[in-house]
Image: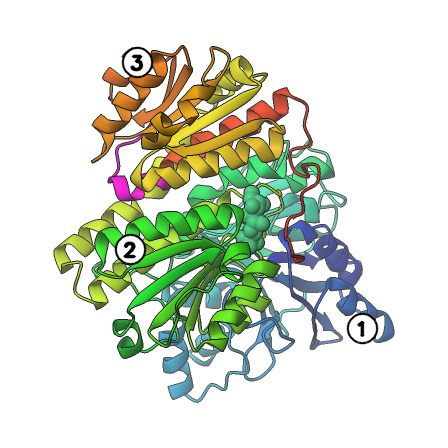
Amino acid sequence: MCGIVGYVGTGKATPVILDGLARLEYRGYDSAGIAVIEDGVLKVRRRAGRLAQLVESLKLEPIEGSVGIGHTRWATHGAPSEKNSHPHCDCRGDIAVVHNGIIENYQELKNQLEARGHVFKSETDTEVVAHLLEEEFTQGAPSLVEAARRALPKAKGAYALGLLRRQEPGVLVAARLGSPLIVGLGSGENYVASDVPAILSRTRNIVYLNDGEVIELTPTAWKVTDLNGVPREHPVSRIEWSVDAAEKGGFEKFMLKEIHEQPRVIRETLMGRISADKKSIQLKDMNLSVEELKSLKKMFIVSCGTAFHAGYVGKYLLEHFTNLPVEVDLASEFRYRSPKMDKDTVIFTVTQSGETADTLASVRAAKAKGCKVISICNVVGSSIARESHGVIYTNAGPEIGVASTKAYTAQLTAFCLFTIYYGKLTGSIPDEKAADMIRQLEGIPDKVDEILKDQAHIKALATKYAQAPSWLYLGRKFNFPTALEGALKNKEITYTHAEGFAAGEMKHGPIALIHKEMPILCIAPRGETYEKMTSNIREVGARAGRIICVATRGDADIAGISEDVIYVPETPEEFSPILCVVPLQLLAYYCARARGCDIDKPRNLAKSVTVE
Ligand code: AGP
């Protein structure tokens, strides 16, 4: 989730761009850069690290000009470095590009362009756009905006782009497909940005570009077309948000914004990893050979907190669909017990931050025993990502809320991808089944969207139950970890005691806890353990527990044994954890809100636990 700012006007571009980039800090970044046309020369300055480094450099050596683009990078392809930071240029240094998104077919395009003599300087997907534009000018494109219209249909994936060309000093071009980009209309100057906060101090008059559109801006005019050059009309919207509200996209808290980002995040985690024929999965950062993967005899999934719950779902998936024995362990325990590991053992770690001390220590302990390490991680270039042999990145963007939500569903998505990938590789998942799983997986984001539309019902339930003194969460099989995760979401932001249990475990003690003030959250979607789950629900109901069920839409029976029901769309049970957790995230959120808790920064908690 990078940050883009562009300016064209009669004033100085550099301060406007730097101020805008600073206001996008919540989008996270590991490097930053700017390109400005100064006296007919396209000048580019880039720095790894925080924005301050770039600001300092520009103080020492200013770049003066009235049109420019800037970028803060959240790395997805290529580690954080000056070489990989944006803007990227063509061979001649005439064109500069900043980009947010993923060009899925960049390697194919890069190969074609290199074959035509283009020289690349970075490891990024973005750089191909600069060379594609250069090619269009070689073929006679009359202008930057026309070159963009001709070049962009070749790029597959998602992009929000800011473009400059030395020969067109009074022009700023932008385009979007699948990544956010807005246009700000000022007085004698105009702007583009990834998000409203970047330009709110300059203007409240905003134009929202649609996917597949290109805009050409000058200081006093703007024109939107589609990629065929057909003009597109757009209303000008007036933004009334405060800057703080704008950083949260109009949501009251980052956690709520991130819960609502999940459909997009799941799509972006799938993006570029499903083959064109939708029959196989490609995981390019795996860095283990087919032989190494096929020779695996054992897997340990090791992580902490929410990531541990994701790993637990991963265990159920891998044991259900492959022949690999899988153990899960808390990283804080794993490193102190004596697990039997050798070169045919793989350690799978799951981590949003990539910096959790216990997880990092487990990675090092496993490598010391000759094990391979694969990590599911959200931060490119983080310690755990760097020290793992293979990485599956979750393209969730920075997660600001301490309580993990979008990172969790992205981790589950990554496990679904790996399960299909490994199952096909080892022959345990037939081709037809794999194709069906891929089709079902691609339908998940829309189903999450449907659940989010039911938010008012969940908010009403929170009002009803928020003051409960303690909660139980019950689930079975794939959704036993969902019960653990739902309880964690609740306890960490409402400060209420909440425990997750395997539903079958109730009779072995926990059922003694039930009392009439206690909500029992039962995760009971259709599936192999549905009947067992409903008998557990009846047992609890007989003891006056207040039952709230998460169930499959259309299941009328469940309502007869529950006080309240939250329905989720039908989906194969192996993918149901991604859906069933969303109501639990929202329920915890609205309970915390009703209790007046500090939701984004809960007491005693840190976003990344880098100490043991
Ligand atoms: C979950 O909401 C918490 N933020 C916490 O349990 C977190 O999942 C855990 O600390 C692991 O962090 P990581 O994913 O960055 O390694």
Q: Disc 1 residue type?
A: Ser
Q: Earlier in the sequence, mark 3 or mark 1?
A: 1
The answer to whether the residues at label 2 and label 1 have Cβ atoms under 8 Å apart is: no
Q: Which of labels 3 and 1 is toward the front?
A: 3
Provide the residue span drawn in magenta.
567-577
User: Callout 2: helix, strand or loop?
Assistant: helix
Read off the residue under disc 1.
Answer: 57
What residue is drawn where x is 65% and y is 65%? 30
What residue is drawn where x is 58% and y is 59%? 358
Q: Disc 2 residue type?
A: Leu
246 relative to 418, above or below: above
Q: Nearer the viewer, residue 487 or 584?
A: 487
Q: Nearer the viewer, residue 245 or 211?
A: 245
Q: Nearer the viewer, residue 90 or 532?
A: 532
Residue 71 visible here: yes
User: Callout 3: helix, strand or loop?
Assistant: helix
Q: Earlier in the sequence, mark 3 or mark 2?
A: 2
**Is residue 39 found left or right of 375 in the rendered image?**
right
Label ID, residue 561: 3
Q: Nearer the viewer, residue 406 or 57?
A: 406
247 relative to 526, above or below: below
Read off the residue under disc 2.
Answer: 318
What residue is drawn where x is 41% and y is 33%? 501
| Residue 549: quadrant of the picture | top left
Q: Earlier in the sequence, mark 2 or mark 1?
A: 1
